[in-house]
Image (cartoon, helix red, strand yellow):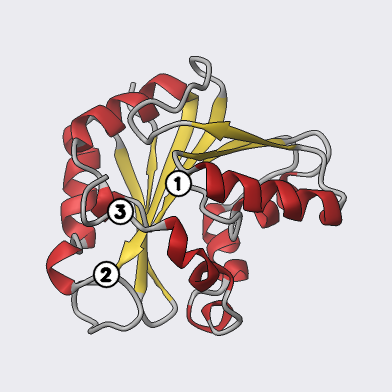
């Protein structure tokens, strides 16, 4: 684990009530433009902050794969599932560069506050391409570089939205939008590579 990776010992921060004010889930879901029946992968799902609302948004005919490398995070999602009544979410142990998902299985691949932790962005981009349907879309939400912490990682660990967009374009994706979400985050949405 590199020093940029979020520690499971800090998982309580992911569910802190104040996070809902500075990273509004509804705003992100609106940008993602989810539809009933979508199949989505939330890669680096953490405690399910986005995975559970995405599962509700895609409805009973949709499906969400909550992918995380940390067993403690997946256990937190499992405990929330029991109380939520959500049945279309599956927890998967995997890395951003090796999700363990099938080829061409997702309409959307979503990474929230993960991109700055990635050691090999080319491997992650290749994995996203492998698991995405054609057409499909990628959404990368991460920390703005022009806003001081807290919250979030040190400024030197953050990656600009322009660098994320450039990486996606270089990998053959077409950037659809770049937006700010709350005071600390941006989201880049791109259509799948051919």
Cα separation between marks 1 and 2: 16 Å
Question: Can you give x and y, in whole percent of width and height, for residue 29 in the image?
Answer: 59, 59
> Is disc 1 placed on a helix, strand or loop?
loop
In percent of the image, x 18 and y 58: which residue is there? 162
Q: Quadrant of residue 37?
A: top right
Residue at the spot 24% in from the left edge and 28% down from the top edge: 123
Q: Nearer the viewer, residue 93 or 144?
A: 93
Q: In which quarter of the image is the C terminus?
A: top left
Q: In the visual, does 35 lie left or right of 84?
A: left
Dot 2 falls on a residue whose secondary structure is loop
Task: Please give the residue where the numbered disc 2 appears in the rendered image.
Answer: 153
Name the residue carrying label 3. 5
How far apart are labels 3 and 1 at the CA level? Answer: 10 Å
Which label is found at residue 44? 1
Residue lying furthest left: 156
**Image vertical order of residue 49 relative to residue 170, above or below:** below
Number of residue marks: 3
| Residue toward you, 74 or 146 | 74
Contact between marks 1 and 2 (CB within 8 A): the answer is no
State which quarter of the image contains the N terminus. Answer: top left
Place of residue 36 in the rendered image (x, y in percent of width and height, measured from the top left): 75, 42
Report crowding for label 1: few under 14, some 14 to 19, many 20 or more residues within 10 A (C-alpha): many
Q: What element carries label 3?
A: loop
- Of badges 3 and 1, the one in the foreground is 3
Dot 3 or dot 2, earlier in sequence: 3
Give me the disc on residue 107. Answer: none
Mark 3 surroundings: few (<14), some (14-19) or many (≥20) residues within 10 A: some
Q: In this view, does 13 lie to the left or right of 120?
A: right
């Amino acid at each position: 684990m590199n020093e940029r990776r979020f520690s499971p010992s800090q998982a309580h921060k992911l569910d802190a009530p104040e996070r809902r004010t500075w990273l509004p889930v509804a705003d992100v879901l609106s940008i993602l433009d989810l539809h009933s029946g979508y199949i989505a992968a939330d890669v680096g799902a953490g405690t399910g902050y986005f995975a559970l609302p995405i599962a509700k948004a895609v409805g009973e005919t949709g499906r969400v794969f909550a992918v995380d490398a940390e067993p403690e995070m997946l256990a937190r999602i499992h405990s929330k599932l029991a109380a939520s009544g959500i049945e279309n979410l599956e927890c998967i142990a995997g890395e951003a560069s090796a999700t363990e998902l099938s080829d061409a299985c997702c309409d959307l691949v979503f990474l929230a506050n993960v991109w700055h932790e990635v050691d090999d962005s080319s491997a992650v981009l290749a994995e996203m391409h492998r698991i995405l349907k054609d057409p499909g879309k990628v959404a990368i939400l991460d920390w703005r570089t022009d806003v001081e912490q807290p919250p979030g990682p040190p400024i030197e660990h953050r990656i600009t939205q322009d660098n994320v967009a450039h990486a996606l374009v270089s990998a053959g994706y077409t950037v659809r939008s770049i937006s700010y979400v709350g005071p600390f985050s941006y989201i880049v949405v791109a259509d799948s590579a051919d």
